[in-house]
Amino acid sequence: MSNNREKLFAEFQAPTTQEWLDKIQVDLKGADFNKKLVWRTDEGFSVQPFYRREDVLKLKTPDALPGEFPFVRGNKQDNNSWYVRQNIDAKDAKAANAKALDILNKGVDSLGFHFCGDCVNAGFVETLLEGIQCDCVELNFCTCKRRSVELAKLLVDYFDKKGYDKEKIVGSIDWDPIEKIVMKGKDVTPLLSLAPQLIEVFKDYPKFRCIAVNAASLNNAGAYIVQELGYALAWGNEYLSELVEAGVEPTLAASKIKFNMGITQNYFMEIAKFRAARLLWADIVKQYEPKCDCACRMCVNATTTTYNMTMFDSYVNLLRTQTETMSAALGGVHSIVVEPFDVVYEQPTDFSERIARNQQLLLKEESHFDKVVDPAAGSYFIEELTTSLADAAWKLFLKVEDEGGFLAAVKQGTVQDDINATNTKRHGDAAKRKEFILGTNQFPNFTETSDGRRPVSCSCGCGSKEETPFKAIESSRLAADFEQLRLQTEASGKVPTAFMLTIGNLAWRQARAQFSSNFLACAGYKIIDNLGFDTVEEGVESAMKAGADIVVLCSSDDEYATYAVPAFNCLAGRALFIVAGAPACMDELKAAGIENFIHVKCDVLATLKEYNAKLGIN
């Protein structure tokens, strides 16, 4: 059989890269290869349309082994399992305990308890953990940073009281004062001195981490992947450097740091991000000369982002979070939190939380993502992305270090300015539909209403009027502007009707009608499409009978010179008149009094705000 295969393959000569390029150039028919096929990423590097074995042979990442330094291929050698985590609001210890016990029987093996500092006492801890086998699940706690040391001591006392093996306790405390400076601009630098105390409390618990790097906050503020990665590394290095300078042994210090990172819908790039993160973090820790390479392992809890989630057509959020979860799983993270699809507009329901859990269980129990170590290894594309992301993030890391380190950069406001600029750009791109938000700025559900739903207030501190000594990150979800516009339309009491006056060339009128319908439905307008009219007079008459507030002329560019002015005159100001497209005769049409044109280069959001104003919707 092997001889037959050899003979079969010998009949085919593998084409060279140049031969592929020559063939592509022929198919492009003279078009620019770089403009047509090379992907210019937001991460600062370009991606080719294809890669070959010769490309990946130049890289170092495929030479690594799973479970070995620099851990680019994961921290494990025999599986790709991760913790299925669900966070719980634990202000009521008894209710939180009951919920924890319930979901532990439904596939969850990692709990995240969030509660205020006033709850930190021995009775609260005992009630919260009653009946939970702490050596069988991962336990994570988030409370007031000023009382985290007190919480740490209470937890250790509880574990000792119950007689747990310290080697089997897995978990973390989300202690990250720097996040308060980054996100809210508050000066909490005095709290940084508590870090060595936290580590001292947990020094005998090798699998319990107590210093957090909450780069997920940057992700939820709109940061590009390379920004989240580069700043996360600098953030972690800031803590590591401070700890070592305070006298904490490097191996112990590194083993107590946990990274909380977000996941965007950039599927392959996110897989590469987690691989690159482990690679770079291992190199950083190595410079502190730890006693063993095990200290160089990066521990990452990944959470699906809320930045791209939507209130309208919210079930699309399930598609977003599912691909995000797949990226994190294939990227080899420690644990994953899937945000419920309704989290941006209500307290998640039992149903949405169950679906969120099942999204991870499906990947484990049905797709077996937890069985194969680094399944992305060897993919020419992902190996290239890993290397390119690592190079770009490393440049950002070095830039921050040149500014005096992450804390110094945050105090100067350069990190906040960078993230805020990205958020502004992304909102601008969404307004122009350069960045699609399915169901919001592209292909919205025409008939959907809010049914009383309203976006929940942002938890990142944006919009705060409090005077702070440092700059803050100001952000809102990508869909927020369109949602506000649509809610404004609903609140007006009269939803405008947009009538498609389709005439002329069949292909063009249908395409223009579809484009215009999607365009105007983004503001929540009622859409009436039509098969076509023989005359503009017939179309205008039908529009008036339908009670149209907007009439959109849909035809070909050539035919607009014939149809536009007669249709405009026939309408005689009884409704807002729009021409779908940017025809060559646009100047002549404007001279005739036609003001409104919609086309692919429009700022959709600004145009719809303008139309709302013209229709008396404020």
Image (cartoon, rainbow, N blue to C red):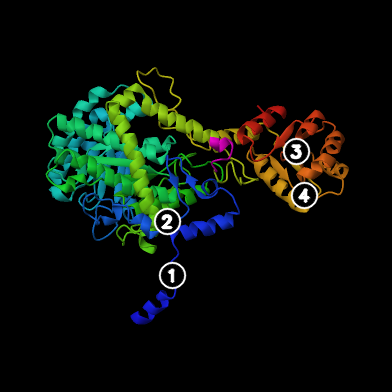
Residue indicated by mark 4: 530
Estimate the spatial distance between the alpha carbons at disc 4 and disc 1, rounded to whole Å.
55 Å
Q: On the picture, is 249 further left or further right than 588?
A: left
Residue 548, position as x, y percentages in the image: 78, 38
Marking on residue 584? 3
Estimate the spatial distance between the alpha carbons at disc 3 and disc 2, rounded to whole Å.
41 Å
Q: Which numbered mark, 3 or 4, is in the foreground of this view? A: 3
Which residues fall within the magenta stretch? 429-436
Residue 535, position as x, y percentages in the image: 87, 46
Q: Secondary structure at mark 1?
A: loop
Indicate the amino acid at tag 1: Gln
Disc 3 residue crowd, few under 14, some 14–19, many 20+, Cα 10 Å: few
Q: Can residue 33 be found in the magenta stretch?
A: no
Instruction: Of the two numbered discs 3 and 2 on the same chain, state the one appearing first in sequence.
Output: 2
Residue indicated by mark 1: 13
Marking on residue 51? 2
Estimate the spatial distance between the alpha carbons at disc 2 and disc 4, rounded to whole Å.
47 Å
Disc 4 residue crowd, few under 14, some 14–19, many 20+, Cα 10 Å: some
Foreground pick, 90 / 605: 605
